[in-house]
Amino acid sequence: MRLLHRLRTMDWSRWLRAELAHCPVCGRAFRPVAVPLPVASGQPRRELGALCPDCADRIPWILAPLCKVCGRPERCEDCRRRRETHFVVSRSAVRYDGTMREWLALYKYRGAERLEPVLAAMLAHALERMAAELGFDEPGKAFGMMTAVPLSDERLAERGFNQAERLARRLAGWYGIPFAPLLRRIRHTDKMSFKSRSERLTDVRGIFSPDPLIAAVLVRRSHSVAACARQSLSAAGSGRRPPVSGNSPRPLYRILIVDDVYTTGSTMNEASRILKGALGAGFELFGLTWARS
Ligand SMILES: [Zn+2]
Ligand SMILES: [Zn+2]
């Protein structure tokens, strides 16, 4: 009888609410179910698991890149026509469709901060795949440093934050890759989406300059090279095998440049050109963007 009484007087609505999760994108309450996710690492999987099944279903993941250079899932004229590519490869997590435009606009212009971990977790898909393509089981072993495409001071003041840098910093934290702002935007460009291909190409020329922080990266690189050489020497002396690259000390030479949307690749290529010029030989640049338009 007492049990029956308890069941009758129990606050069922509270119990039901406790079981529900709220989707960070659409805000709807839902009961979490396991959905297949193309991300292996724990933290980004948890962030993606916060999406309701409807929103999770709407993500246009790029699962099979067709263009070897930019990772576009279709035939790609931009990479074929580009005269000089300064990055090794670039990969994007999703296609830039209407839904993704909506999500990015919510985050970028309408201050929906709750979307930040979700967008970063989506970017994790492209990072993990690119590391796997390079033959590494963990992104932290493949890349020595992460940086982001900067905004101009004017745009930064207007928006209050650099979305690419925020996403990159989260990702860097999850995978244990150091983040450093290595570029500065010295010129503001008008909205690129309204421009033709040739306009974009000439427009980006000279928009970036290297950040003075690069000097510190070069010092760290020379320390790491020296440490590698010391280890190799002592290993050779003791008859042990020299350390394999990818183990400690962490090689700094593969640097990731993060941006939100990749359109023709002209911004990514210009950022890579400037970094390559500033860092010199021994560094390779890789593009990582949230969406491929
Ligand atoms: Zn939802
Ligand atoms: Zn391409």
Image (tube, rainbow, N blue to C red):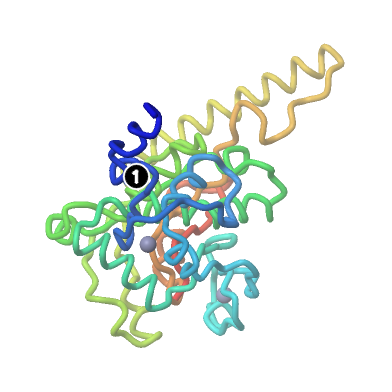
- Residue located 31% across and 36% down the image: 10
* Image quarter in which the C terminus is found: bottom left
Looking at the image, is 238 positioned above or below residue 134? above
Q: Between residues 277 and 246, which one lies in front from this camera angle?
A: 246
Identify which residue is drawn at 12% across, 60% down: 158
Answer few, some or many: residues within 10 Å of disc 1's Cα (few below 14, many 20 plus, some between 14 and 19): some
Judge by depth and name the residue closer to the eye, 280 or 259: 259
Q: Residue furthest front?
A: 1
x and y, in percent, of residue 32 in the image: 46, 51
Front residue of 223/110: it is: 110
Left-right relation of 104 to 197: left
Residue 214 x/y as whole percent: 39, 41
Residue 63's quadrant in the figure? Answer: bottom right
Horizontal and vertical percent position of residue 215: 39, 37
**Horizontal and vertical percent for residue 6?**
34, 31
State the image quarter where residue 115 is shown: bottom left
Which residue does the image show at 27% across and 68% down from the upper left? 105
Which quadrant: the N terminus? top left
Q: Residue at x 65, y 26 (%)?
A: 228
SS class, disc 1: loop
**Quadrant assignment, res 137:** top right
* Position of 145 relative to 35 (above/below): above
* Rendered-image quarter of ligand 2: bottom right
